[in-house]
Amino acid sequence: MADIEVKPAPVDAAVTVAAAAPKKPANYAAMWQLYLILALVFVNSANNGYDGSMFSSVLAFQDFLDFFGTSGADARTSELAILINVGNIVGGFLAGPICDFRGRRFGLAVGCIIIIVAAVIQGTATGDSQLMGGRFLIGVGLPITVSAAPIFVAELSPPEIRGTLVGLYNCMWYLGSFAARVTVLGLASYSGSIKWRLPLFLQMTPSVIVLLTLWALPESPRYLMFKGREEDAARVLAKYHAGGDVDSPLVREQIAEIQASIEEEARYRPDSFKTSLMGAFALFSSRQSLHRLVLAWMIAFFPGVSIISYYLVPMLKEAGIYTDTTELWIGVGLDLCAFFASIAGSLFLVERIGRRGMGLIAVCITVVAMVILGICTKFAVESSNYTATVFAVVAIYILSTGFALTWNPLQALYPTEIWSFSLRAKAVGFTNVFWGCSGLLFNAVNPLGLGNLSYNYYFVQMAWNAVWAGLVYFLMVETKGRSLEELDEIFSAKNPVKESLKPRADIAALPEKADA
């Protein structure tokens, strides 16, 4: 297939101007307003974390298991878990067109409304069908919000700290997970269905917060430029990037870069909701796009901690821990450790060792942790060895914390930064289709694997994780220190991975177009 030639805008001009041009005194009020705006958007990331840990935690309640006729590690559990993933696939296809149709804020609003309605449905469930319907709608709403939010953060953030801010966005996943576990833990002493109904109902909380504060958020300046509103885009950029100076060289250069990028890619630009849906075919139109899709698939399908997200309680029971409150407290500790680890990874690692380094370290940690977990659980099962049980829990902590430190910052950042503007919303939406498919796979396989293979399933997981070492090494393009326009040029090279590892001074020699 012949590649489509896309001439990128000037390489890293905005960052160069930001470093070289005289600066106005910092407008600290506007700077802190920007951080507050992004913090409000970060709350959206808690939606995903809440669902996985909430569902895993309520599996500790026998009332819940009896009500829906499941053991917590059987095919019935899998059915309840995978409905959200089926919804993810549907919502992932809709996310891009919705975010392009009326902007990133509109996408956030639509997704939040769907989640709020779904939470009411599942929280008041009187039978299987109502619970399933609510979980399916949760699945539809989540990919719409988690497509709009990181794109919004990436497009509004100052270029010199974009990577860190988008990485920090995903840290809120663990606060959502922590909130779910603490809620369930606080209700553990209650009797009746309230102990599991309230956590289901409270899943709407992050969406309510985001929906009520959307009015305070500016629209993405890149989306404003996309719609021909150059003056509005300049005012947003000036307020948050240049101390309010619309005539700042930094603002002028950013406007020029965005305009050049939009003009070069105008052939892809959808003019309506309908053509936006059809425009998704551009994701498959060239070798560069296919390579990017494979990278998005790698991010979504890395097994990592998928087994912990929904099946922590069955894992702990397998290792010899049967007390509900103990299981929940272990989950709370996991979330706190992972939260701080993910912040450390976003602040100190992602722009230092790069995306490839983070990916390779993540694979090593997960492989080692799975081996330790499998061996310790084997001794705990076969000889009721308390020391083995303790080390099995330690292995779970290593797995969760190591994943949060290394792979978690990449999950929102990498699929967002590898795409050019005109395809970004559709591509991130399609990445959420991958997330839905991976969740469908993991939630179908993990409970059956635990139920049928016991501790041997951890060695299967180890092998599965190990495959990603080769995928990361041979396919993952390094994006550290590159502007979005520069990455377009790197992906057009014959060997993007090799070119991405060259010193930045060598990038200027890259050809504009690689042979098919």
Image (tube, helix red, strand yellow):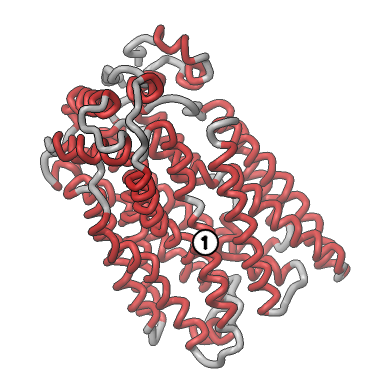
Q: Is residue 503 left or right of residue 276?
A: right
- Report if residue 150 is visible in the image: no
Residue 186, horizontal then vertical, whole percent: 57, 81
What residue sits 71% from the left and 52% below the top?
Answer: 398
Q: Is residue 69 left or right of residue 395?
A: left
What residue sits 17% from the left and 25% below the top?
Answer: 263
Q: Splitting the image into 4 quarters, where does residue 45 fall?
A: bottom left
> Callout 1 environment at 10 Å: few (<14), some (14 to 19), or many (20+)?
many
Residue 188, horizontal then vertical, whole percent: 59, 84
Q: Is residue 385 left or right of residue 307?
A: right
Query: What number of labels is visible?
Result: 1
Q: Is residue 405 left or right of residue 274?
A: right
- Report if residue 324 is visible in the image: yes
Q: Amino acid at mark 1?
A: Leu
SS at circle 1: helix
Residue 508, horizontal then vertical, whole percent: 40, 10
Q: Splitting the image into 4 quarters, where does residue 241 fall?
A: top left
From this view, report whether residue 501 is shown above or below residue 122: above
What residue sits 70% from the left and 57% below the top?
Answer: 396
Name the quadrant of the C terminus. Answer: top left
Residue 442, horizontal then vertical, whole percent: 53, 56
Name the quadrant of the N terminus. Answer: top left
Disc 1 marks which residue? 175
From this view, report whether residue 220 is shown above or below residue 172: above
From this view, report whether residue 289 is shown above or below residue 3: below
Residue at the farthest front position: 25
What residue sits 25% from the left and 53% below the top?
Answer: 105
